[in-house]
Image (cartoon, rainbow, N blue to C red):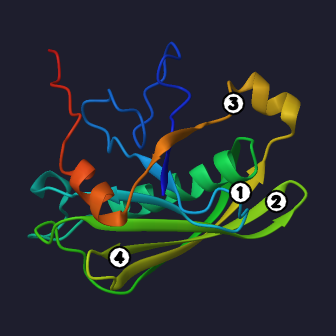
Amino acid sequence: MREILNPWINLNGYNCFGCCPTNPIGAQMRFYEEDPSDIMGDIVSVWIPTQNHQSWLNTLHGGMQATLLDEVCGWVVFKKLCTSGVTAKFELKYKKAVSTMGGPLILRARLKQNNHRVAVVEGSLSDAEGNVLTMCECTYFAFPEEKAREMQFMEAGLSDEDYTLEQIIERAKQPVYKSIRL
C-alpha cells in the first residue's frame, strides 16, 4: 500500500479533527491506497485508541467510531473520485464492542456505487486480528469540479514507498501528537 499524501497540510486554517496531523486533540489519521489502479480498491487507515476515547470503561465511544469511519469514507471520495463532497447519509452497524485497550484498529473503505454526483461508500472498522467490529454505508454528495476547487480541494498524491499492513500499524504507534497550548 502507498500512503496518500495529505494535500492540505500547509493550507491556512486547516484543522480537520479526523486527518490534520497538527490538531492536538484530533485523530490525526493517515490514509493508504491499497491498489491505486482500481477505483473500487480500498482506502486504509490504522488508528490506535486510548482511554481518552472511551464511553464506558475500556470501550471506544460510538461517536468516535462514527467519526473514524466517516473520515476514511470521505478519503475514498477525495482519492478515488478526485473531488470533495459532503456526507448526505450515514448508516452505522455496531457489531461488537470496541476495546480502547486492544491495540490498533484497521479502517477500510471502498466505493460501492457512483451515480454522477452521488457516491455510496462502504466502510469497516476491525481489530488487528481482522474481526469486523463496526460497519457503515455512507452516501456522499460529490461536488462538481468548480465547487470542489472553491472548497479548497487539492488532488492528493501518493508516496513512493510501499507499506505492508504490519508497517502501517508500526507507523501508527508513532504519534504525531502536538501538545495543547494554553
- Horizontal and vertical percent position of residue 137: 60, 73
Viewer-side residue, 146 vs 39: 39
The residue at 87%/28% (across/down) is 146
Q: Quadrant of residue 178?
A: top left
Instruction: Identify the mark nearer the N-term, 1 or 4.
Output: 4
Residue 29 position in % (x across, y down): 38, 46
Residue at image position (45%, 34%) is 16
Q: CA distance from mark 1 to mark 3?
A: 15 Å
Q: Earlier in the sequence, mark 2 or mark 3?
A: 2
Residue 142: horizontal and vertical position, in percent? 78, 49
| Distance (Cα) linking label 1 and label 4 | 22 Å
Drawn side of residue 21 relative to residue 174, left or right: right
Q: Earlier in the sequence, mark 1 or mark 3?
A: 1
Give above or below for 169 relative to 85.
Answer: below
Name the amino acid, label 4.
Ser
Mark 3 to mark 4: distance in Å?
A: 29 Å
Residue position for label 4:
126
Sort mark 4 into few (<14), some (14-19) or many (20+) by Cα contacts within 10 Å: some
- Identify the secondary structure beneath mark 4: strand
Q: Nearer the viewer, residue 126 or 87?
A: 126
Instruction: Determine the CA span between mark 2 and mark 3.
Output: 17 Å
The answer for how far apart the CA atoms under marks 2 and 4 are is 26 Å
The mark that comes first in sequence, 2 or 1, is 2
Residue drawn at 26 percent across, 51 percent down: 172
Tell me whether circle 2 and circle 1 mark residues in contact (CB < 8 Å).
yes
| Viewer-side label of 2, 4 | 4
What residue is disc 2 on? 118
Residue occupied by mark 3: 153
Check the image and name the residue furthest to the front: 161
The type of residue carrying mark 1 is Tyr
Q: Pick whichever of labels 3 and 4 is earlier in the sequence.
A: 4
55 displayed left or right of 64: left
